[in-house]
Image (cartoon, grey):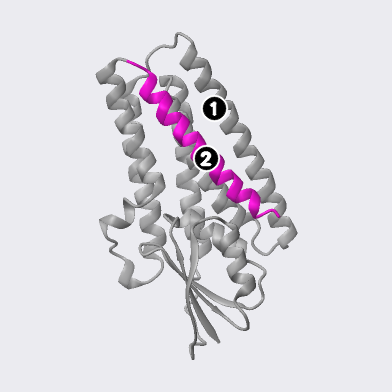
Amino acid sequence: MNKTIFEITKMDCPSEENLIRMKLDGISSIVNLDFDIPNRKLTVFHSGEIDQIEKSVLELNLGGKKISTEQTDQTEFNENSNQKKLLWTVLGINFAFFLIEMTTGIISKSMGLVADSLDMLADSFVYGISLFAVGGTLTRKKQIAKLAGYFQITLAIIGFVEVLRRFFGDEKIPDFSTMIIVSIFALIANGICLYILQKSKSKEEAHMKASMIFTSNDVIINLGVIIAGLLVNWLSSSKPDLIIGTIVFVLVIQGAFRILKLSK
């Protein structure tokens, strides 16, 4: 048995972990995967050569880099029997906030909330692909990933068009208070999701450090929408909201391309 450690610099939250799991699914030489999100490390226990595994990790463009490979006597691994239940929980939280942010974003005329709702939907896709493809074939999983990726890109493009329309048109200023309040709740929801999944790893990780939460891209986006809401109120302008919306739409499209890579 060999143990190879990868550094994954862009592995900020459990959705990236799920992407990696799906990408490596089907490689028969892999015995176990151990994720350390706070330190952005992935440990792969495998037999034979590492070449195929390393190639798959690099293809995701998550900043993967092999650190070391060594032999190990470890042959037993603790499998989490509650993984499916936990995935359903975080899927439910993410999808619920997709609906909440999309609805409040449209009502409050905030593109920042609309864009953030699509980011929540993107995470839901990642968890959903894993759940609905459990026990299915790799071909089935790739088909689901392709549909999810293209659907996500379509929504993001529609969002970009709306941003341009509002930027060059005479659009009303978004309701900054709704932006801030909803984003605070979304921030809490993302923290809960990260806490639930990290707590499941082991008892030692039950009480995670604050830095674990604030390295998450999702949380940074939530903070960005909150700041945009404050600037909307301060400047009496919709431009901060449109700027943060554009940034998040770009991140959503990047996530969609990562999902599409799983379909190849």
x, y percentage for residue 137?
73, 62
Residue 1, picture quadrant: bottom right
Q: Is residue 59 left or right of residue 95?
A: right
Q: Is 150 included in the stretch rendered in magenta?
A: no
On the image, which quarter does residue 243 sit in?
top left
Range drawn in magenta:
237-264
Q: Quadrant of the C terminus?
A: bottom right
Type of amino acid at the residue the image marks with label 2: Val
Outermost residue toward the top in this view: 170
Q: Is residue 162 left or right of residue 244?
A: right
Element marked by disc 2: helix
The residue under label 1 is which amino acid type?
Answer: Gly
Horizontally, residue 233 falls left or right of residue 17, namely left
Give the percent coordinates (x, y) of residue 134.
64, 62
CA separation, marks 1 and 2? 11 Å
52 to 139, vertically: above or below: below
Q: Are there few (<14), some (14-19), or many (20+) residues within 10 Å of tag 2?
A: many
Is residue 107 visible in the rendered image? The answer is yes
Tell whether position 246 is magenta.
Answer: yes
x then y, percent, for residue 211: 28, 56
Q: Which residue is mark 2?
A: 252
Query: Can residue 104 be seen from the camera position used here?
Result: no
Residue 15 vertical position relative to residue 122 in the rendered view, above or below = below
Taking 141 as reference, is 207 left or right?
left
Residue under label 1: 159
